[in-house]
Image (tube, rainbow, N blue to C red):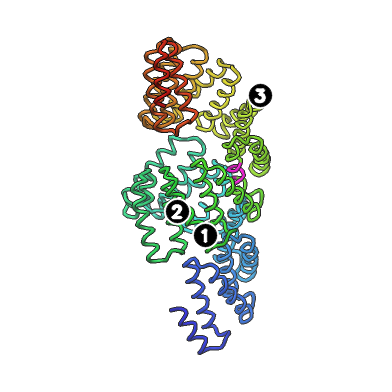
């Protein structure tokens, strides 16, 4: 329709007539709303050139045309070009309209957002503080735009892990949203969810949980979302139902908007994520590939959304143990993120961490270590030594040292990690990451045969897990298994057995009988029976382990061979040589 209008105007009016400019602007706007950025950009460039000629550079319409083009660049992830234009827009709006004009403040907020997208948090923060103060003065504290400015600044604090400052603002935002919009408004619920996330990042699990339960309850009951809304269903981990709805959404998006519309691609990516969360890697992979192809076609290879799609596919390969394919993609992601975002951008650093992890999983410790050393240096420079991500980088490097048997170096780093995580200003003793640091250090002591020190830490870990986590939480079960292993190494069979029985029972309940961790728990308990000379009980369990290993693992898998060797050892102890040959034939 708009095409026809434009054609009519072209026949009727001169080239530079305002009606033609208006029609081109509207058509560009339609393309933008359909996610057809390239076509929108082409038209917007025309509009900008014509506006400059006809109206001059300082005319409000020309400045708006400039702002629209900047927005299209942003949507393509072309941050530098967007920033260039936004700086001009801001300068012109200040000169023409004054600093306190709403359009000037919007220009400031847009530029701040572009800085944020480039990981330039300090510059973003500077502008956002100005935006917030100006909006408070011009519009008042309760105006929706002022509250948005507050939420944006809180988000920037959050991205820098400045939890206290983020929390302070988020509490204000939540209070204002409740007053202005009401308790049940989607924005109020989002504010609540953001505050819960900040509590979680500070290790204040109880407060986070309380808020998350309220968020879930509100999303279930309010008319705006309801119990069957995808957000509610995903929040409850009801993946099957989420999948059903997402399939419907995807079908509708394809019919109404077409296969290449950004909303359709987003729907596809969301469905892939739901498959991923259910461990349905093949189905996730299928969709990830489609999303990637669409993003490449629509946005180009260097667009952040395309790079994210590549990273997601790499992650799906990783979860299938397809390290080579994952590595190939991760190398691309790292190269592109360095080129597009720069070496110090958080997304680039994350890409580096993912690649290091893939090297680690292939046992390529030297390459992993090389990247991890770079990572640690970058995180210290960009984020500071006490930032949670810096501490994680330290912990990962320690883990690589540990895998190379460099226990002293591992221990040195792990002690630093534990000390930093314990510090009240960073996380605190009860934070899950602090407990993990404790468990890792215990593991290093264990590998050095320092069983007493290992035991001491493992008892603390288990006690903390009991305080912080639910009875059936996997981390708690692992802590129990580790302590049992330390008792075992000290020949304290009764204490080991007591814990191993609990571990086995819990793993059967939580993971099911055929899960590798359940089978390991069974094998460990069998070994404890064997060491106490209770060969009959050991044999019973070892037969189960062997049968399960045959079912779950491929033939000739190292764990299946170990299970067979253990059973053979038990038979030998009972003098049942006949049984050994029988089992070999069956295998």
Mark 2 — residue?
Answer: 287
Residue at 47% of width from left, 79% of height from top?
3
Q: Are marks 2 and 1 in contact (CB under 8 Å)?
A: no
| Picture coordinates of residue 29, whole percent (x, y) | 50, 71
Q: Residue at x 52, y 15 (%)?
A: 489
User: Taking 263 as reference, is 68 left or right?
Assistant: right
Residue 431 in percent (x, y) is at: 51, 32
Single out the mark in the foreground, 2 or 1: 2
The numbered mark, 3 or 1, whose residue comes first in the sequence reads: 1
Q: Residue 387: where, in percent of width, then height?
A: 60, 39
- Residue placed most toward the observer, 266 or 227: 266
In-image side of 416 versus 171 (left or right): right
User: Which residue is under mark 1?
Assistant: 295
Relative vertical location of residue 4 with respect to residue 416 in this rendering, above or below: below
Neighbours of disc 1 within 10 Å: few (<14), some (14-19), many (20+): many
The quadrant of the image that shows the N terminus is bottom left
Q: Position of residue 189 (x, y in %)?
A: 40, 49
Kindly identify the residue that appears in the image at 44 percent across and 61 percent down: 263
Q: Secondary structure at mark 3?
A: helix
Per the rendering, the mark at residue 408 is 3
Residue closer to the observer: 174 or 22: 22
Numbered disc in front, either 2 or 3: 2
Q: Secondary structure at mark 2?
A: helix
Measure how far apart labels 3 and 1 are at the Cα level.
Answer: 47 Å
Residue 275 vs 416, above or below: the answer is below
Q: Is residue 473 above or below residue 447?
A: below
Q: Closer to the camera, 101 or 163?
A: 163
Q: Secondary structure at mark 1?
A: helix
């Amino acid at each position: 329709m708009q095409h026809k209008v434009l054609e009519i105007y072209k026949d009727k009016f001169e080239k530079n007539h305002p009606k033609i400019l208006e029609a081109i602007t509207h058509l560009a706007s339609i393309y933008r709303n359909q996610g057809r950025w390239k076509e929108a950009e082409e038209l917007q460039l025309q509009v900008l050139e014509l506006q400059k000629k006809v109206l001059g550079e300082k005319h409000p319409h020309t400045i708006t045309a400039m702002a629209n083009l900047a927005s299209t660049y942003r949507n393509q992830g072309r941050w530098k070009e967007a920033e260039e234009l936004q700086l001009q827009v801001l300068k012109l709006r200040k000169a023409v309209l004054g600093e306190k004009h709403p359009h000037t403040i919007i220009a400031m907020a847009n530029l701040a957002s572009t800085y944020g997208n480039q990981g330039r948090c300090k510059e973003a923060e500077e502008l956002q503080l100005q935006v917030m103060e100006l909006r408070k003065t011009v519009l008042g504290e309760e105006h929706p735009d002022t509250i948005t400015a507050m939420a944006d600044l809180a988000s920037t604090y959050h991205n820098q892990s400045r939890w206290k400052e983020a929390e302070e603002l988020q509490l204000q935002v939540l209070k204002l949203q409740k007053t202005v919009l009401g308790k049940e408004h989607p924005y109020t619920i989002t504010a609540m969810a953001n505050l819960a996330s900040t509590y979680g990042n500070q290790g204040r699990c109880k407060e986070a949980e309380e808020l998350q339960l309220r968020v879930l309850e509100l999303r279930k009951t309010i008319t705006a979302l309801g119990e069957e809304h995808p957000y509610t269903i995903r929040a409850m981990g009801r993946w099957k139902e989420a999948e059903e709805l997402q399939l419907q959404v995807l079908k509708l998006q394809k019919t109404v908007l077409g296969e290449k519309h950004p909303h359709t691609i987003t729907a596809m990516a969301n469905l892939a994520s739901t498959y991923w969360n259910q461990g349905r890697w093949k189905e996730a992979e299928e969709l990830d590939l489609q999303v990637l192809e669409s993003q490449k076609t629509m946005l180009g290879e260097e667009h952040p959304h395309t790079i994210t799609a590549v990273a997601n596919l790499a992650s799906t390969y990783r979860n299938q143990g397809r390290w080579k394919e994952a590595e190939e993609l991760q190398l691309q992601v790292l190269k592109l993120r360095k080129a597009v975002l720069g070496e110090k951008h958080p997304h680039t650093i994350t890409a580096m961490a993912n690649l290091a992890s893939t090297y680690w999983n292939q046992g390529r410790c030297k390459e992993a270590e090389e990247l991890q050393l770079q990572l640690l240096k970058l995180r210290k420079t960009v984020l500071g030594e006490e930032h949670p991500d810096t501490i994680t980088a330290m912990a990962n490097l320690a883990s690589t040292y540990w895998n190379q048997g460099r226990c002293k170096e591992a221990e040195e780093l792990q002690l630093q990690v534990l000390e930093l995580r314990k510090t009240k200003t960073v996380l605190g003793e009860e934070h899950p990451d602090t407990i993990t640091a404790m468990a890792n250090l215990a593991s290093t002591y264990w590998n050095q045969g320092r069983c007493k020190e290992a035991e001491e830490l493992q008892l603390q870990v288990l006690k903390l897990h009991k305080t912080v986590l639910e009875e059936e939480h996997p981390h708690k079960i692992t802590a129990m298994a580790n302590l049992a292993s330390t008792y075992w190494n000290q020949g304290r069979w009764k204490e080991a057995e007591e814990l191993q029985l609990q571990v086995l029972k819990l793993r059967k309940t939580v993971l099911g009988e055929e899960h590798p961790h359940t089978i390991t728990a069974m094998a460990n308990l069998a070994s404890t029976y064997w060491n106490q000379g209770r060969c009959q009980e050991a044999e019973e369990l070892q037969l189960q382990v062997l049968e399960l290993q045959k079912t779950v693992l491929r033939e000739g898998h190292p764990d299946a061979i170990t299970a067979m060797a253990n059973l053979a050892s038990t038979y030998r102890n009972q003098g049942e040589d006949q049984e050994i040959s029988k089992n070999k034939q069956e295998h």
